[in-house]
Image: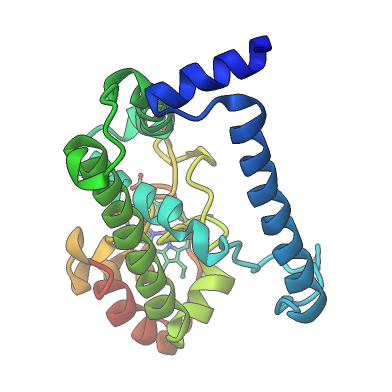
């Protein structure tokens, strides 16, 4: 009996599949089928393309494709709670910490999950992580879709896009949150995100900020009609 046959017998007795060549060929087969499906798909199903990129369009709102809404929405919601905790200065902890934690958790899986069971129901930890992951992506994707839709279908949003988005962001759209500015009193500040301005300022305070901007925001001389549109729009962002 050759060495390979000997090994194969041994594996068979243990009830496991050897990597070479059995497992490898199976993986290769599945991989080729997946590529073939993608190829056929790309021949017959044409993606919807946006308009051609225009570098002169300064009011353009970059938004991720829907399958990345969860990232944007996670940091939008996370950033909100971060600022409630007065940790805005440490937002890099959130930006770096969350991905590092998430990826490390994936690397830890083979070390934590050492049970030989393959049936899902006998692997409560893995099933739990899977469910958590699906709920996590599902929640933040749906939340992100709603956030974008709520925003874009509103008329005042176009005023925001042309007059405010160079400095402020709403739900991750627009904004220059890192663009530090100097206030008239000499302090350094940056335009805050307006994603949740309705739960921070009252409608009267928002109106006052637009009529007599404070803290380094320039006087924009907005027409009264624009202010009338913007105040309830901003007050609804909670
Ligand atoms: C040139 C940059 C710039 C533009 C353009 C701008 N803002 Fe501001 N805005 C600021 C800065 C800076 C602050 C104050 C930051 C601080 O409080 O330290 C601010 C503050 C605000 C606040 C108060 C937010 C809070 O949480 O206290 C509101 C509301 C606001 N802006 C709305 C608007 C709206 C609406 C527009 C468009 C019509 C606009 N801003 C355009 C820079 C800008």
- Residue 83, position as x, y percentages in the image: 25, 42
Visible in this render: residue 63?
A: yes
> Does 175 sit above or below residue 90?
below
Q: Quadrant of residue 235?
A: bottom left
Q: How is the image coloured?
A: rainbow
> Does 173 sit above or below residue 31?
below
Residue positioned 51% across, 20% down in the render: 9
Q: Quadrant of residue 227?
A: bottom left
- Residue 21, position as x, y percentages in the image: 67, 29
Name the residue at the front extreme: 1
127 displayed left or right of 47: left
> Does 23 sit above or below residue 58?
above
- Residue 141, position as x, y percentages in the image: 38, 63
Visible in this render: residue 85?
A: no
Q: How many marks?
A: 0
26 displayed left or right of 125: right
Residue positioned 51% across, 40% down in the render: 178
Question: Taking the image as four quarters, which one is ligand 1 found in?
Answer: bottom left
Q: Quadrant of the N terminus?
A: top right
Q: Give 199 or 93, whichever is nearer the viewer.
A: 93
Residue positioned 32% across, 66% down in the render: 143
Q: Give 57 or 38, whichever is nearer the viewer.
A: 38
Q: Quadrant of the C terminus?
A: bottom left
- Residue 136, position as x, y percentages in the image: 30, 52
Q: Give 68 or 147, whichever is nearer the viewer.
A: 68
Residue positioned 32% across, 45% down in the render: 79
Q: Give 125 or 179, whichever is nearer the viewer.
A: 125
């Amino acid at each position: 009996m050759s060495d390979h046959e000997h090994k194969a017998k041994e594996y068979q007795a243990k009830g496991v599949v050897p990597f070479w060549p059995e497992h490898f060929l199976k993986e290769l087969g599945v991989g080729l089928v997946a590529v073939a499906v993608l190829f056929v798909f790309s021949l017959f199903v044409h993606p919807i393309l946006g308009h051609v990129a225009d570098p002169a369009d300064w009011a353009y709102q970059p938004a991720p494709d829907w399958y990345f809404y969860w990232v944007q929405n996670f940091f939008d919601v996370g950033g909100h709670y971060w600022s409630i905790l007065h940790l805005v200065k440490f937002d890099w902890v959130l930006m770096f910490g969350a991905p590092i934690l998430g990826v490390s958790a994936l690397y830890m899986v083979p070390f934590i999950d050492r049970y030989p069971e393959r049936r899902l129901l006998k692997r409560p930890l893995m099933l739990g992580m899977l469910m958590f992951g699906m709920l996590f992506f599902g929640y933040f994707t749906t939340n992100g879709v709603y956030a974008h839709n709520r925003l874009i279908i509103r008329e005042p949003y176009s005023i925001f896009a042309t007059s405010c988005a160079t400095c402020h962001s709403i739900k991750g759209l627009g904004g220059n949150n890192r663009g530090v500015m100097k206030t008239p009193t000499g302090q350094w500040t940056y335009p805050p995100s307006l994603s949740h301005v309705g739960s921070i300022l009252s409608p009267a305070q928002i109106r006052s900020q637009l009529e007599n901007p404070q803290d380094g925001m320039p006087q924009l001389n907005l027409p009264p009609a624009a202010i009338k549109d913007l105040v309830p729009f901003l007050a609804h962002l909670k």
